[in-house]
Every structure is written in C-alpha cells, then in structure tokens.
Image (tube, rainbow, N blue to C red):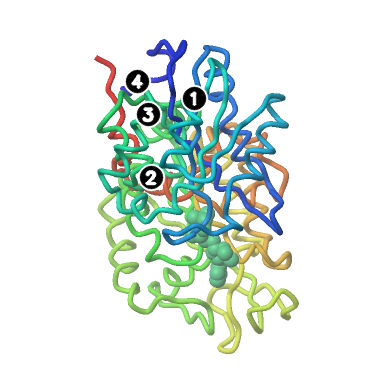
Amino acid sequence: MKKTLKDVNFKGKKTLVRVDFNVPLEDGKITDDTRIEAALPTIKYLIEEGARVILMSHLGRPKGKAVDSLRLDPVAKRLADILGQEVSKVDDCVGDEVKKAVETLQDGDVLLLENTRFHAEEKANDPEFAKELASFADIFVSDAFGAAHRAHASTVGVTEYIPSVAGFLMQRELNALDDVMQNPESPFVAIMGGAKVSDKIGVIRNLMKKVDYLLVGGGIANTFLRASGYETGKSLVEEDKLDLAKDLLKETEEKSVEIVLPIDVIVADKFDKNADSKVVAVDEIPADWQSLDSGGPETIAKYTEIIKNSRTVIWNGPLGVFEFDKFAKGTNAIAQALADSNAKTIIGGGDSAAAIKKAGLEDKMTHISTGGGASLMFFEGKPLPGVEALDDVE
Ligand code: ADP
Ligand code: MG
C-alpha cells in the first residue's frame, strides 16, 4: 500500500504536485478540460489543508526545448477560473524565478510551473534536474496517473529527494484497476480491439490468464481471423504477428479461456469516411475490400450476450475505425452493452475512453481510466514506475 494524502499533515508545507495537465489545445484554447477536472479533488484538498501548492505537468511534445504554443498559461487561467482563486504561473519549471515565486507562497496559494518537457532532462530522468525540482518543496504528491508508466524526473526522479505520496486521482485509479485485476468476479470478460496486435500482445497474454472470455475486435480481429484461415482481403493484417495469433488461439485449448472472433464484419471499398460499405460474413470478405468494423449484427448479438452474462468486463480498444461514423457500429454497440450490463465495467486506453465519451455513456461505467498507456501497462501486469517510487505505508 502506498501512502496517500491522508497520511500527511500539509499545513504550511511546500507541496510539489505532479498533475496531468496534458490537455488538447486548438489555437491556444483548451478544447477539453477533463484532465484539469480530474486533478481538482487533490488540489482543492491541499488548498483546504493549508498547503503551499506547486503544480507541475508536461504538455504535448516540445522535445526538450521551450515551445510557446505548449506553454501552460491557458491551463493556469482555466484552473484559476474553476478554483475561483489566483493561480500564479512562472515561465520555467526550474531556476531562480521559480525559487522566488515559491518563497512568496502563502498557505493555500497555488503556483503552476512551466511545461516540464521544455527540458530534455525531464524525459531523461536526470538526477540533478529532479533534485532541483524537489528542492522547491517539502513533500511530493503524485496525481498524474496518465504519466505513471514513464520514469521521468517529475514522476520518479523527484521521489529520491522528498517524501512522496499518491494523490486522490492516482489512488482512485489504482484502487479501481487493482480491484479488477486482483478480485474479478466471474464470468470475467476482456474485450480487445484497436489497430494493432503488436501494441497489445502483453495485455492479451496477461488477461488470457485471468479472463473467461476474450472478445476480439477492430484491426486486431483481422490478424486473428487470418490466423484462423479466413481470407481478409485488403484489411489491416500484421503478417509478422500471424504465428503469434495462431499460438494464442492454440493456447486457449489448454487454458479455460475462450477467444471469441467476429462472425460478420462491415467491409469498405476503401479507407475513407464515405467509403461504400456492406455487412459480410467473415468467410466472405471480398478480395478488394477491407474490414473496418467488427460491428456485424451477428457479432454484436453474440458479444452483447456474453457481456450481459458477465460480472466483470475490461475493455481496451475500439472495435472499428470509430472516427468514421459509418464504422462505429461495433464500438457503439459494445459501449451500449457495457452501459446496460450490471457488471463491473473498466475501460482503459485513450481511444476507447474517447469512444465512450462520444457515445455519451461515461456515467454508466464503473471506471474509465484517465491514463491510456498507464492503464495498458497495468493490464499487462507490470508495475508502474511512477507508482513503485512512492512511499509505502509502514
Ligand atoms: P486505445 O487507445 O483505446 O488503446 P488503440 O489506440 O489501440 O486503442 O486503437 C484505436 C485505433 O484503432 C483507432 O484509431 C481506430 O481507428 C483503429 N482501428 C480499429 N479498428 C480498425 C480496423 N479494422 N482497421 C484499421 N484501424 C482500426
Ligand atoms: Mg490509442
């Protein structure tokens, strides 16, 4: 068990908080402030407890140098609006300006440091850089679950120098994901979709040890269908993963897991949102067409039935190219089936979470992880460096 906010007295303490303010920006405007909202419980708690709050985050990919369009000023402004109090902002995350700004902080004040990735030392987890970040504070709070799979200076490095505890968002994510991986009620179903098998091998392997059913969809399904002997036309297939897919299908014979593949799919004459489309059985995919959606009616009926009878469901990866409305049927049907079920429903993966939001069904899920890569690493059964580094409860 990791220490959390409740294990610490924050009154008057300079508190360095790693948040995930990696928000989408268009022309300098924040288009979705979910990530800011997600960090609020921790920030508000620290303010109420009288901490001197020093926030830090990365934003985008500035590649180790200052990039004006990736400054955190819009975030500081939005956060100030939401909190109804001033949020001061400095133009770097290290150096004298930061030191001075920290010295003027009163209990309950909030300061936002500049994008940590303006320094190459951040991703390199450079010890001197981490030490300087840590030097501004008495204690470190890690609330950026979405960055916990990376061993960077602001997620792992700083924990070497000051006491380090988990924030509320981090705690909520760990509780939800731990619970489903440690004590899943069966029938336990995993739905795996997305573009590529290669991105998901570790997750599939680990979940196969735990689940009763593995429902396969999306681009991944094409590789599995081909490995099962079907012709898949121009569909996305990873030729170099066919043997692996065959091995996985074979392994199920010894394990108590059933891998379920689509029965019918929606094929397109080209990869385009206005492509011609039709439903075909998986043994009738035309040579010139490609499967862009595992959302055939028979597939949806079968997958929905399995979900309906389950007690625990993990979903990662859309069942089709859901960015094109025409090919979002399978993805939307699965989202609806999860919304209608009484099972514990856990969603990981950035695109899967986006698909659920697009369908307006977020409130119907048990937990939608805020961390794409981090949740996948969790499903792989691997320890997250940004979590491991935090202090244990004695
Ligand atoms: P997540 O972010 O939830 O982990 P992924 O990033 O693995 O999901 O996969 C999402 C992507 O997979 C989407 O951009 C979607 O268009 C793509 N995809 C799904 N099905 C197919 C398919 N049949 N062919 C090509 N791409 C697909
Ligand atoms: Mg993705």
**Whether residue 172 is situated above or below residue 301 in the rendered picture:** above
Q: Residue 3: which disc?
A: 4
Label 2 CA crowd tier, 10 Å (few <14, some 14–19, many 20+): many
First along the sequence among labels 2 and 1: 1
Depth check, mark 3 against mark 2: the one in front is: 2
Q: Residue at x 57, y 60 (%)?
A: 319
Q: Is mark 3 within 8 Å of ligand 1?
A: no
Residue 379's mark? 2
Expressed as whole percent of the image width and height from the top left, the position of residue 390 reads 31, 29
The dot on residue 28 is none
What residue is disc 1 on? 168
Mark 1: which secondary structure? Answer: helix
Query: Considering the image in quadrants, where does the C terminus appear?
Result: top left
Q: Dot 3 surroundings within 10 Å: few (below 14), some, or many (20 or more)? A: few
Left or right: where 294 falls relative to 257:
right
| x and y, in percent, of residue 298 in the image | 63, 61
Pointer 1 or 3: first along the chain: 1
